[in-house]
């Protein structure tokens, strides 16, 4: 199983990165988890326009799904004819939200995507065994656990501390975890994690490696975030970058 980071900026594109988008590959199958603002550009750089076999949108904030709207043009109007409908696993209402963002007339996109509503549980996507659960964010949001060949990737999506996050990350080889806020300051509740909270979750879940993502360069210090995470998690800690690849 391979993870490729297409975008990792939190809340809005940063000077060096698009928003959240992560390509997970195994056995020739490519699952795109989140498709945030600007990440279609990175998809072309690191994989290819038609390289995606399925999409999962963990929630419907723009920084995690907006380029699924732009991607309609790619699949509908490609020379040689439209591409087959692509499976999209997302919270209920994703079809309507993408259609509304794509055109003022809310033109349906069911010729481009086949939608499957997420709910807590375990199910297959291609060669992967995927488990999702609701996490602590203001709108319906799912953390993700992806298993293949005895290896585990866990992804927090956007969340404040919660038990579901610990269950999803339990024993994961890689824990891709957001760290949007700084420790030691007054942050909005029930929205995002700090570096220290990401490290605490990694320790409680006994993960192998912590990959910090969704940092907001305009709001936080990367060095301070890593320092806080390393103070609460004894294992390896990295901040992900666009184009970074991790083999499990």
Image (cartoon, rainbow, N blue to C red):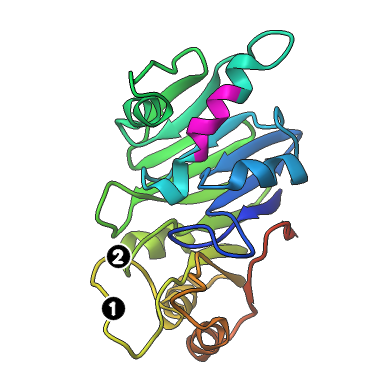
Residue 109: percent from left, percent from top: 44, 18
The image's mark for residue 191 is 2
Residue at (28, 46) in percent of width and height: 140
Is residue 202 part of the magenta span, yes or no? no
Q: Is residue 155 above or below residue 128?
A: below
Label 2, residues with CA under 10 Å away: few <14, some 14-19, many ≥20: some
**What element does badge 2 sit on?**
loop
On the image, which quarter does residue 125 sit in? top right
Residue at (35, 62) in percent of width and height: 159
Residue 169: percent from left, percent from top: 48, 62
Residue 201: percent from left, percent from top: 43, 74
On the image, which quarter does residue 165 sit in? bottom left
Question: Seen in the image, is 160 located left or right of residue 123?
Answer: left
Residue at (45, 42) in percent of width and height: 65
**What element does badge 1 sit on?**
loop
Quarter holding the C terminus is: bottom right
Question: Seen in the image, is 156 located left or right of residue 30?
Answer: left
Residue at (73, 56) in percent of width and height: 243
The answer for how far apart the CA atoms under marks 2 and 1 are is: 9 Å
In this rendered view, identify the residue nearer to me: 173 or 39: 39
Residue 37: percent from left, percent from top: 51, 47
In this rendered view, identify the residue nearer to me: 17 or 236: 17
C-beta proximity under 8 Å, tags 2 and 1: yes
Span highlighted in magenta in the image: 67-73
Most common secondary structure along the magenta stretch: helix
Q: Is residue 45 visible?
A: yes
In this rendered view, identify the residue nearer to me: 91 or 73: 73
Is residue 71 part of the magenta span, yes or no? yes
Which residue is labeled 1 in the image? 187
Q: Is residue 112 above or below residue 193?
A: above
């Amino acid at each position: 199983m391979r993870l490729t980071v297409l975008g990792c900026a939190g809340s809005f594109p940063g000077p060096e990165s698009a928003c959240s988008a992560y390509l997970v590959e195994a056995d020739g199958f490519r699952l795109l988890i989140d498709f945030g603002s600007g990440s279609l550009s990175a998809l072309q750089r690191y994989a290819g326009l038609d390289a995606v076999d399925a999409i999962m949108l963990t929630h419907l904030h723009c920084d995690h799904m907006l380029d699924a709207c732009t991607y309609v043009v790619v699949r509908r109007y490609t020379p040689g004819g439209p591409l087959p409908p692509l499976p999209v696993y997302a919270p209920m209402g994703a079809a309507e939200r993408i259609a509304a963002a794509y055109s003022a007339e809310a033109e349906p996109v069911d010729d481009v995507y086949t939608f499957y509503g997420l709910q807590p549980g375990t199910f297959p996507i291609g060669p992967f065994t995927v488990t999702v659960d609701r996490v602590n964010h203001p709108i319906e949001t799912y953390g993700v656990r992806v298993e293949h060949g005895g290896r585990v990737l866990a992804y927090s999506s956007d969340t404040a501390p919660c038990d579901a996050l610990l269950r999803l990350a339990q024993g994961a080889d890689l824990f891709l975890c957001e760290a949007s806020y700084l420790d030691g300051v007054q942050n909005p509740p029930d929205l995002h994690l700090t570096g220290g909270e990401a490290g605490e979750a990694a320790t409680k879940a006994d993960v192998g490696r912590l990959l910090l993502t969704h940092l907001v360069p305009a709001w936080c210090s990367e060095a301070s975030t890593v320092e806080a995470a390393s103070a609460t998690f004894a294992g390896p800690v990295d901040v992900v970058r666009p184009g970074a690849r991790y083999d499990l």
